[in-house]
Amino acid sequence: MSARYLIRFDDICPTMDWKIWDGIEAVLIQHDVKPILSVIPDNQDQKFHCGESANGFWDRVRAWQGRGWTIGLHGYQHRFVTRDSGLLGLNGYSEFAGLPLEEQRVKLEKAVKIFSREGVRPDVWVAPGHSFDANTIQALVSLGIHTISDSLFLYPHRDSRGVFWIPQQLWKFRAMPFGIWTVCIHHPDELYTNLAYFRRSIQKYRHAITSLPEVVETYAQRKQNWLDAVFAGLWGFGIRARRTLLARPAQEKCLAPVRDSDSLRGRKAEPAQ
């Protein structure tokens, strides 16, 4: 089976740069691409305060969902309060990993209530900084969220708890022979800031771009096997090795999630709220 790609945009919030986003959205609509949009329920991360808060932000979120686009619950406030790398071990900072179960549940309840108040359904969980732990999953399940967009597997699968895992392994398009690949796009990435490059990439890979509902329909009952674990281990090792070998400027250019570490660099973790 040839490779298929999901597109995920992280850090969607009222104070993002809407001039850039409007161009991206137009390309998505033109080519009938249905992305995953990871919405921060109550953004408190100053990195994403790029302008005045957009009027009608939640109207737009509801319109996206009505269009068949997937809305992800992207944490709660996008504030990194621990130095725990969580289950994936990619980044040493987290909004959730390392916190007690009840503390995580309270934060997630607040996030879900904001979505509910605004008439938005959380289709999938997207952890800020790719960092979450077993307590996070337990709290998500208790709140009725059973789909996670993360992990480094080659294909999606459903685990013994009924949680459906959709892997996220790329931060730009790459030609792959097989597998399900989620391309995660952050605000500083060239795929976000260079509209011409984004349009060319969509045109080049459009034949292989899928959507979350299509992935769920195909893989909903698939179970994890030994190949998933082996591939995830090797892919994760490759990411960490590359981060170690490359100089910091080049690393931040190629691996967008590393930028998130600025929230904790050089200071103690903030107390959880």
Image (cartoon, rainbow, N blue to C red):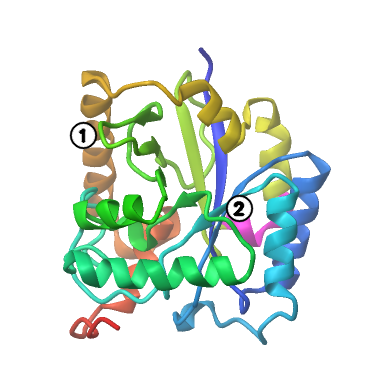
Q: Report the magenta residues as a range.
A: 190-196
Which dot marks residue 172? none
Residue occupying the point 47% across, 65% down: 112
Report the quarter where the C terminus lies: bottom left
Magenta stretch: residue 15 in it?
no
Question: Which amino acid lies under the numbered mark 1 shown in the image of this protein?
Answer: Gly
- Residue 95 shows up from this direction: no
Is 270 on the left or on the right of 194, as rendered?
A: left
Magenta stretch: residue 191 in it?
yes
Is 128 on the left or on the right of 273, as rendered?
A: right
Which dot marks residue 233? 1
Q: In x, y percent, where is residue 72?
A: 52, 55
Question: Which amino acid lies under the numbered mark 2 shown in the image of this protein?
Answer: Leu
Q: Which residue is mark 2?
A: 191
Q: In x, y percent, where is residue 67?
A: 75, 48
Q: Secondary structure at mark 1?
A: helix
Looking at the image, which is closer to me, 266 or 52? 52
Looking at the image, which is closer to me, 232 or 270? 270
